[in-house]
Image (tube, helix red, strand yellow):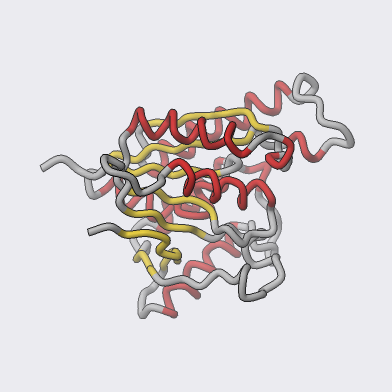
């Protein structure tokens, strides 16, 4: 029996691992086909003025890390787009939607994991909106289930208002795949920070254990169920 087709849509390199690296590894171990779409180039927002040419060497290295991290968690395909880092609001939402639609047409997913719509990071919020728009529930739509994930140092850093709060409803046991998540995140060495920063390997392990305790597990990733059509 063929496995499911799973698509992870993330704004930046490393978001896919932070958000659902352990869950991707579980899907892959179960025989599901996992694909990753990264919409933004990464890095250039750290410069006083964006200059992608100046950062070409660093960007090439970062994008190579996407493929290496994907292999660690068992993803079979990666798709990289080049929207300006932390400037998704400088392009029309429709342009982002069309990229999602193009990749969705190629991999025909039944499940999509993407960002939480209440994140502090503007690129994360627009990625969420683009996915919902690209997956409008029409006859013939392949996507039956959409989950939102949390990203350390973005989801929890926004003001915790009713509209922004991340309220998980689904817990995935990643006890056996937590190591794969941490190993994949280790590929992004330049994105890691020292503990107790949430984007440290120890911080991610602590968060996974905290999530697990909430659900009676040793380690877990948490999601908000956005849509599930049975």
User: Residue drawn at (70%, 66%), measured in percent from left and top?
Assistant: 158
User: Residue drawn at (55%, 62%), measured in percent from left and top?
Assistant: 204
Asked if residue 171 is positioned above or below residue 1 in the image, the reply reads below
In terms of image quadrants, where is residue 51?
A: top right
Quadrant including the C terminus: bottom left
User: Residue drawn at (74%, 37%), measured in percent from left and top?
Assistant: 90
Residue 49 in picture, x, y percent from top left: 87, 32
Residue 201 in picture, x, y percent from top left: 58, 57
User: Residue drawn at (44%, 28%), measured in percent from left and top?
Assistant: 102
Between 204 and 97, the residue placed more toward the observer is: 97
Residue 97 in picture, x, y percent from top left: 52, 37
Quadrant including the N terminus: top left
In terms of image quadrants, where is residue 46?
A: top right
Between 98 and 20, the residue placed more toward the observer is: 98
Residue 85 in picture, x, y percent from top left: 70, 38
Q: Residue furthest left?
A: 1
Q: Residue furthest right?
A: 48
């Amino acid at each position: 029996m063929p496995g499911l087709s799973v698509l992870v849509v993330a704004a930046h390199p490393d978001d896919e691992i932070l958000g659902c690296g352990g869950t991707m590894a579980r899907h892959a171990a179960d025989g599901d086909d996992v694909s990753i779409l990264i919409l933004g180039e990464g890095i250039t927002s750290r410069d006083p003025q964006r200059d992608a040419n100046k950062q070409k060497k660093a960007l090439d290295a970062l994008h190579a890390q996407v493929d290496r991290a994907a292999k660690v968690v068992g993803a079979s395909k990666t798709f990289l787009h080049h929207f300006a880092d932390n400037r998704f609001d400088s392009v029309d939402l429709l342009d982002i939607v069309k990229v999602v639609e193009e990749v969705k047409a190629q991999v025909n997913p039944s499940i999509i994991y993407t960002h939480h719509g209440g994140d502090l990071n503007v690129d994360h919020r627009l990625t969420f909106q683009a996915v919902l728009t690209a997956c409008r529930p029409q006859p013939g739509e392949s996507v039956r289930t959409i989950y939102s994930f949390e990203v350390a140092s973005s989801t929890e850093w926004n003001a915790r208002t009713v509209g922004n709060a991340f309220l998980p409803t689904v817990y995935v046991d990643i006890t056996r795949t937590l190591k794969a998540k941490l190993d994949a995140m280790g590929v992004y060495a330049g994105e890691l920070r020292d503990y107790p920063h949430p984007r440290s390997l120890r911080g991610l392990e602590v968060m996974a254990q905290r999530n697990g305790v909430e659900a009676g597990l040793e380690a877990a990733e948490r999601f908000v169920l956005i849509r599930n059509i049975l």
